[in-house]
Amino acid sequence: MGAPWAFLAAALVIVVWLLTGPIFGFSTEWQLVINSGTTIVTFLMVFLIQNTQNRDARAIHLKLDELLRATPKARNEFMEAEEEDLDEIEREKAIVDKADPAPPKERAHEPKTARQGHRGNGKT
């Protein structure tokens, strides 16, 4: 429903509704038609959008899981994090932060020698 034609169809419905206003004398029934229609469409779109977001999130998790499996030093114990409650996710984040306390943004501002020492392998 995010396609340009869907927007044009919705805009066309509104234009037709506006043009029929004088025919129906801008009555309360005329207003009720657009109010009811937009409410029903909005209600249904919530479920459609949620379904699309759920599918997209699952696809992204699948791709990330594959990258974790393919990366030799990656820790895969966090692969099912999306299934955990927020407290468990925060606990695991603390574990990751403790293992690498300087996120990449902070490392970018360190002198080159400090970055080498931080990573422990002498490479940047």
Image: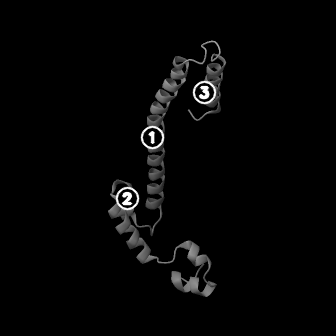
- As measured in the structure, the alpha-carbon distance from the residue carrying label 3 to the one carrying label 2 is 39 Å
Disc 1 to disc 2: CB gap under 8 Å: no
According to the image, what is the colour scheme of the structure?
one colour
Q: Percent x, y for residue 52?
A: 48, 39
Residue nearest the viewer, comparing 44 with 72:
44
What residue sits right under mark 1 in the picture?
A: 50
Task: Sort mark 2 into few (<14), some (14-19) or many (20+) by Cα contacts within 10 Å.
Answer: few
Q: Secondary structure at mark 1?
A: helix
Q: Residue at x 57, y 86 (%)?
A: 114
Of pointers 1 and 3, the one earlier in the residue sequence? 3
- Front-lying residue, 46 or 23: 23
| Mark positioned earlier in the residue sequence (1 or 2) | 1
User: What amino acid is at disc 3?
Assistant: Ala
In-image side of 94 versus 60 (left or right): left
Q: CA distance from mark 1 to mark 2?
A: 20 Å
**Where residue 13 sits: x, y (%)?**
61, 22
Q: Position of residue 18 (x, y in %)?
A: 64, 21
Cβ–Cβ below 8 Å for labels 3 and 2? no
In the drawing, what numbered circle is on residue 81? 2
Residue 10 numbered tag: 3
Residue at 48% across / 50% down in the picture? 60
Quick check: 6 above or below 118? above
Nearer the observer, 28 or 17? 28
Quadrant of the image for the N terminus?
top right
Mark 1 neighbour density, 10 Å: few (under 14) some (14–19) many (20 or more): few
SS at mark 2 in the image: helix
> Is mark 1 in CB contact (under 8 Å) with mark 3?
no
Q: Which quadrant of the rendered structure holds the C terminus?
A: bottom right
